[in-house]
Amino acid sequence: MKFSVALYDLDMVNDYLLALDSINGQHEVIIGFKEISRFFSFSKDECLSVARKLKDKKVHVFLQWDILMTENTFQSVFHGLKGQGLLSNPLFDGIRVQDPGALQSLKEINYQGDIHFICEQGNHNLIGLKSWYNVWPEKIKKIILSPELPAEKVLEYSESLPCECEVLGWGPILLFYTPRALISPLYGDEDEIQVLGTSEESPHKGFPIRENLHGTFMLNTKDQFIFDDLLLERERDLLKDSLVATTKLSWRLDFIQGKGKQTFSQIFDVLKKEAKTERMDDLKVKYGRSVTKGFFRVNKTDVLFKKLKNSRLQDRNEDYLGEIVDVKRKKHLGLLIKSPLNSLKLGDRLRLMSPEGNEKVLKVEYMYDALRNEVEEASNGDIVFVSPIGGISIRSMVYLDNSFS
Amino acid sequence: MTHWVPELLAPAGSLEKLKVAVSYGANAVYLGGQKFGLRSAADNFTPGELREGVRFAHLHGSHVYVVLNSFLHDQDFEDLPEFLTLLEECRVDAVIVSDRGVIEAIKKHSNLVIHLSTQASCLNAAAAKAWKELGVSRIVLGREVTIDEARKIKESVDIELEMFVHGSMCMAYSGNCVISNYTQGRDSNRGGCAHSCRFEYSLSKENEEKKYAHFMSSKDLQGLRQLEEFISAGIDSLKVEGRMKSHHYAGTISKVYSEALNYYKNNGSFLSDDLYQWEQELSKVGHRSYTNASLEKPADDESIYDERQHKQSETTVAAMILEAKEGQYILAEVRSPFYVGDTLEFLPFSGPIVTTQIESIIDASGESFEKSRPGMLWRLPPLMGARPYNIIRVYPGGPK
């Protein structure tokens, strides 16, 4: 298995370097700095220093630029990155971007490193993913898939796309991202604020919410952890066996909120050796945060909820005439002609269908307007009054009944 | 001499709302079909309604755009070509899309004009260029983009730009919120948004007392006073949010913004005595407190709406006209109860609002009542300029 590991502070970097001996060379590291990354706290200089340290150990290092930016900020940041040589610095093997504008700009300057394109939000079909890849096939070496994809889709996409894929294996799930500062109005100005949010209207308690210079981020109450499902059951499941075996997929370890009281050596030791249940359980206990498999087993959120609209009111065929807009018991039915195609004449037969499902047939023996003037023909936009019939209410659909013609 | 103004694009949650919006001056409407949109709870249009809606809009010189802005899963693509064929047959003017895969499918199976939905959060010129290269002809910019930034995008990329001018707003970058997915099992990017951002939350920070707040809820956008900046920036279309909102909303917002834009068209400025009146009208539809959000500068804490419920409409819709027989009578469908002696406001499609007192309430059969009831067909004497889909408001006893 191949891992992409995000290193958020110096302790993590040092700990990762200590674990290098116990992992093979396929791993890669993600780092970033405050101005361009959501959660990295490094300054630009610190980021470069960390990159150098990792590069000295022959680690593959990727720079994360995952902030979404409107025009003014985007121009300033992109020209800053370019001007400071960060887009040509050999310390970075490549860059990870989410904004299509960032991808476009890198293409325009013929960026020389690898590009890892983040397709985590709303990219749930192969046609779209292939289209993103085709923006720059020579340089897009990896597509970061949505954490909402179930296992079979992760495997399908990683096998079908010409580049490598990555999926969140372990780490917080981002639920919400806004550039607006939502916490500081309540807590005062601080560079970074973290709170836990709970709503009586949601069954879930304690959403971690962070505000920093880029805006406000809400994380899920439980972090994604799919390795027990993936590793412990793989020998009974061909799909999981394939997921572990494929070389076209990497698993991201994203410890935004720390990795708990355990070292990377311990973590890799368990994940590499497909450990027994108790060792896997121990990883989660030491992590110290609740975990979930998310949608890795199944994603049913795509079941569109049933239309609230009454299906009896939806059927409009070529015989559709209009709608009942007035019901006066024993006096009349008011019919609004709504079809531009059909008109109503004396002697026509009507089929009426109420919202409750009552169906009635009515022959138009007479009709008149609101001043009781007799009418012989009515067309689109007219309201005419015809003889009353039981079981028909306002909003009943009216059709010409041609079955007797 | 007339001056250039942008298109006014209004929501059409149903066929009736489409007719209301177009009649009150919207140059274009956007609507959803039975599939692939983000408003599963809206009425949405059956194929027959879609045909009729397009016919009506085109007859009045307005355009119709159909939203296909759901993020699709692989299996959804099976039904898409058939739906695209229907849209082409209906002669819709464009489709609004957020998913790159859907854009590819549209290009493959149809010649439909493609607008990029705000759900794709296009925020800068480089992104606009990328979408243009894919075949998109118009971009609905993310709500985080200021008008000044939009101007720069317009200057950099030869593409139509659309911006929101009015209505409710997502607090998150559109397309980047999945709260409903994980908390309610409903995909917010496929029509299942549970509006979790409108909930009240208790917030706890280490060693500090809990605070209760609707901290994620945004005020509603209102950009009436920014119209001149939109025009100066060359923004092609101004969009009003709200397919789920009422006929009253569709009519009032369309009337106010179209009258303001027409004023500019004829005068080259918004220095109108009606400006205050237009703002008053906008306050009469249900809304949260208004903000101009990020239109002038990035939205700050003033844009947060710390309340749960909408402010209720200050006015009640009494009825909507269904038929107007010139010189004879008007038939209106009663929407709210009112009494003889109450004061009515009749909203013509253009021009000043007409105020009158109710002298009698007569139904379609000629029977008189002291009080109307919702659903009854109310017969009124003829009123100058009255047309089907005109809205009538009521003030109990007299105007407030």
Image (spheres, coloured by chain):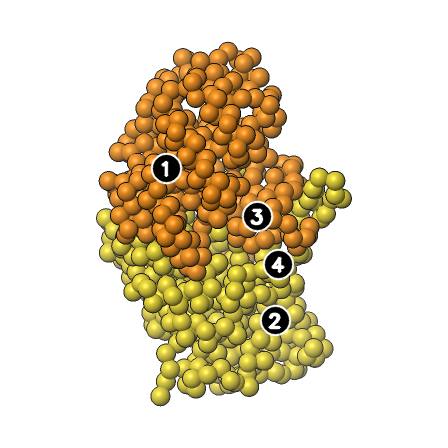
User: Disc 2 to disc 1, how far (Cα)?
Assistant: 60 Å
Closer to the observer: label 1 or label 4? 1
Q: Mark 2 points at which residue?
A: B284
User: Disc 3 to disc 1, how far (Cα)?
Assistant: 27 Å
Residue type, label 4: Asp
Q: Is residue B341 above or below residue B172?
A: below
Q: Which chain carries label 4?
A: B
Q: Which of B280 and B211 is in front in this view?
A: B211
Q: Mark 3 lies on which chain?
A: A
Residue drawn at x 55%, y 27% is A259
Label 3 CA crowd tier, 10 Å (few <14, some 14–19, many 20+): many
User: Disc 1 to disc 4, how far (Cα)?
Assistant: 40 Å
Q: Can see residue A238?
A: yes
Q: Mark 4 points at which residue?
A: B301
Q: Which element type, helix, strand or loop, lies under badge 1?
A: loop
Q: Which chain carries label 2?
A: B
- Quarter of image, res B7: bottom left
Label 1 CA crowd tier, 10 Å (few <14, some 14–19, many 20+): many
In the image, farthest residue toward the bottom: B1
Say if mark 2 contacts mark 1, CB within 8 Å: no
Q: In the figure, the yellow chain has which letter?
A: B
x, y percent for residue A216: 56, 48
Q: Which element type, helix, strand or loop, lies under badge 2?
A: loop
Q: Mark 1 points at which residue?
A: A91
Q: Are marks 3 and 1 on the same chain?
A: yes
